[in-house]
Image: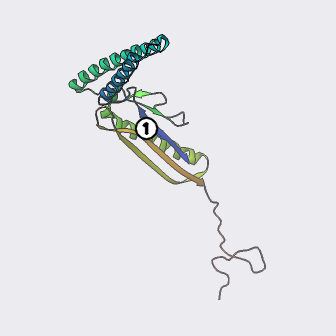
């Protein structure tokens, strides 16, 4: 399992952010909303029906509120960008997505971008060791184990970050050891051994 950027034993450890999109998306949203508002204003000028006018006026007022909210958000994002602080990276949280209760990050936890790589690697190694111990307890042997550390690009600041990891463990039941050192000539169930006859 992995950290979600936590058997087969596998898991996912991934990151998520509370911010929705970067600074570049906000001006486009504002522009689209302003076009919608202008279209409603033009439609309102062409009608004399009070029901239609009332409906259009309500839509225009709703769009104005959304535009004002987005303009305030844009100002905040620009201020943060000037300070060099990316809120998406600052607020990124990591959480284990596996059903293994004995590993870290079972609840969402903030990890700084600088510490994320080592935290994810450490978490994935917990899965490696726990899967090995589980295989030994169950009398199984490990066929393979792999750890993948995932990365992504922040939509707000464009920096690469460790987005999570995944551990996969493949096990199988240990084959029973069967040794046949020799055979007896009169035993029809005996299988060939090291020597059938001595010359």
Q: Can residue 194 be seen in this view?
A: yes
Give the mark count: 1
Q: Which residue is drawn at 33% across and 24% down?
A: 30
Q: Split into 4 quadrants, where in the image is the C terminus? A: bottom right
Query: Percent from the top left, x then y, of residue 132?
Result: 52, 47
Q: Residue at x 42, y 27 (%)?
A: 109
Instruction: Say which quarter of the image contains residue 22.
Output: top left
Q: In this image, 28 relative to 126: left or right? A: left
Query: Percent from the top left, x then y, of residue 53?
Result: 44, 13
Instruction: Say which quarter of the image contains residue 125.
Output: top left
Q: Is residue 3 visible?
A: no
Q: Is the residue marked by circle 1 packed among few (<14), some (14-19), or many (20+) residues within 10 Å?
A: many
User: From the viewer's perspective, is residue 198 above or below residue 7?
Assistant: below
Q: Residue furthest bottom?
A: 199
Q: Which color scheme is applied?
A: rainbow
Q: Residue furthest left?
A: 82
Q: In this image, 170 relative to 185: left or right? A: left
Q: What element carries label 1?
A: helix
Q: Which of 65 and 75 is in front in this view?
A: 65
User: From the viewer's perspective, is residue 175 above or below residue 94?
Assistant: below
Q: Which residue is drawn at 28% across and 23% down?
A: 77
Instruction: Say which quarter of the image contains residue 85.
Output: top left
User: From the viewer's perspective, is residue 98 above or below residue 178?
Assistant: above
Query: Percent from the top left, x then y, of residue 192?
Result: 68, 77
User: From the viewer's perspective, is residue 76 above or below residue 134?
Assistant: above
Q: Which of 177 and 4 is in front in this view?
A: 4
Which residue in the protein does label 1 denote?
123
């Amino acid at each position: 399992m992995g950290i979600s950027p936590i058997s087969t034993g596998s898991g996912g450890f991934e990151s998520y952010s509370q911010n929705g999109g970067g600074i570049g998306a906000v001006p486009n949203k504002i522009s689209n909303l302003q076009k919608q508002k202008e279209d409603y204003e033009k439609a309102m000028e062409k009608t004399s029906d009070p029901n239609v006018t009332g409906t259009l006026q309500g839509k225009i007022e709703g769009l104005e509120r959304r535009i004002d909210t987005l303009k305030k958000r844009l100002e905040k994002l620009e201020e943060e960008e000037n300070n060099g602080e990316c809120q998406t990276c600052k607020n990124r949280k990591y959480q284990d997505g596996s059903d293994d209760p004995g590993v870290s990050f079972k609840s969402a936890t903030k990890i700084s971008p600088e510490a994320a790589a080592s935290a994810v690697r450490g978490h994935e190694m917990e899965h490696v060791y726990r899967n090995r111990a589980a295989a030994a307890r169950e009398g199984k042997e490990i066929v393979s184990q792999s750890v993948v550390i995932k990365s992504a690009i922040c939509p707000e600041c464009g920096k690469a970050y460790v987005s999570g990891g995944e551990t996969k463990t493949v096990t199988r039941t240990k084959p029973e050891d069967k040794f046949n050192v020799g055979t007896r000539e009169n035993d029809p169930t005996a299988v060939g051994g090291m020597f059938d006859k001595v010359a």
